[in-house]
Image: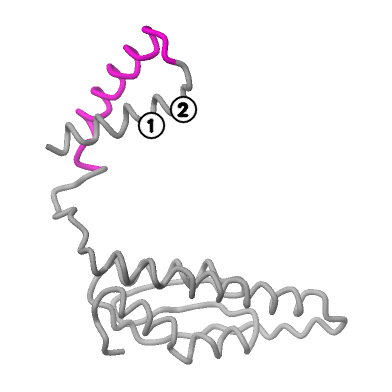
Amino acid sequence: MSFVLTAIIMFVFWMLLSGEFSFILILSGIISSLLVSYWSHDLLIGNADIKPEAARVVRFIKYLPWLLWQIVLSNIDLVYLTLHPELPIDPRMISFKNEYKTDMGKVTLANSITLTPGTVTIEVNNEEFIVHAISEESAKSLISGEMQARVMKIEGEDNV
């Protein structure tokens, strides 16, 4: 099943990128999609259960506007830091406990932190997250734990 699904995805992607529908391009797309799918179908789909829980998808969609707002606020803060005559940056490394049970939760939080201007996830391991923050304000927003709590809710884990 994963072979067929991968081949279909590859072929659709091929057709979208080519933009032409001549016989030779369609035939090339079919052959290429089948070959690539034969060699790599387990990479795209994998053997894991790929059916996402509807509730998790809804929680993630609810999380996105909040994350976008945090990105906007962090951009404003970063512009202030950059344009301020005294350049009041106060870089620091912070760490906090990793309480996520799933890799998806860890990746979601790490990417959310890195997407937010002024913070970069340096390392994630089984015990902790290590983050570089450009200012005390950026560090405080992470230490407060709001982002961590929201990502926990996406995963269906309400305890932070």
User: Does residue 36 show up magenta in the picture?
Assistant: yes
Where residue 63 appears, as percent x and y from the top left, is 41, 72
| Residue 73, image quadrant | bottom right
Residue situated in front as seen by the camera: 122 or 19 = 19
Residue 27's label in the rendered image is none
Whether tag 1 and tag 2 are in contact, CB under 8 A, the answer is yes
Q: CA distance from mark 1 to mark 2?
A: 6 Å
Above or below, comparing residue 42 to residue 59 in the picture: above
Q: Which amino acid type is marked by label 1? A: Phe
Where residue 26 appears, as percent x and y from the top left, is 35, 14
- Image position of 108 (left or right of 4): right
Q: Main secondary structure of the magenta part?
A: helix
Residue situated in front as seen by the camera: 83 or 19 = 19
Picture residue at 85% right of the left edge, 84% below the top = 86
Please, which residue is most extreme toward the right here?
Answer: 85
Q: Secondary structure at mark 2?
A: helix
Residue situated in front as seen by the camera: 88 or 17 = 17
| Residue 75, image quadrant | bottom right
Say few, some or many: other residues with alpha carbon within 10 Å of mark 1 (under 14 / 14 to 19 / 20 or more). few
Point out the image quarter for the C terminus.
bottom left
Instruction: Report which residue position mark 1 lands on.
Output: 13
- Image position of 44 (left or right of 130): left
- Image position of 4 (left or right of 139): left
Instruction: Report which residue position mark 2 lands on.
Output: 17
Say few, some or many: other residues with alpha carbon within 10 Å of mark 2 (under 14 / 14 to 19 / 20 or more). few
Residue situated in front as seen by the camera: 60 or 135 = 60
Q: Which residues are magenta?
A: 21-43
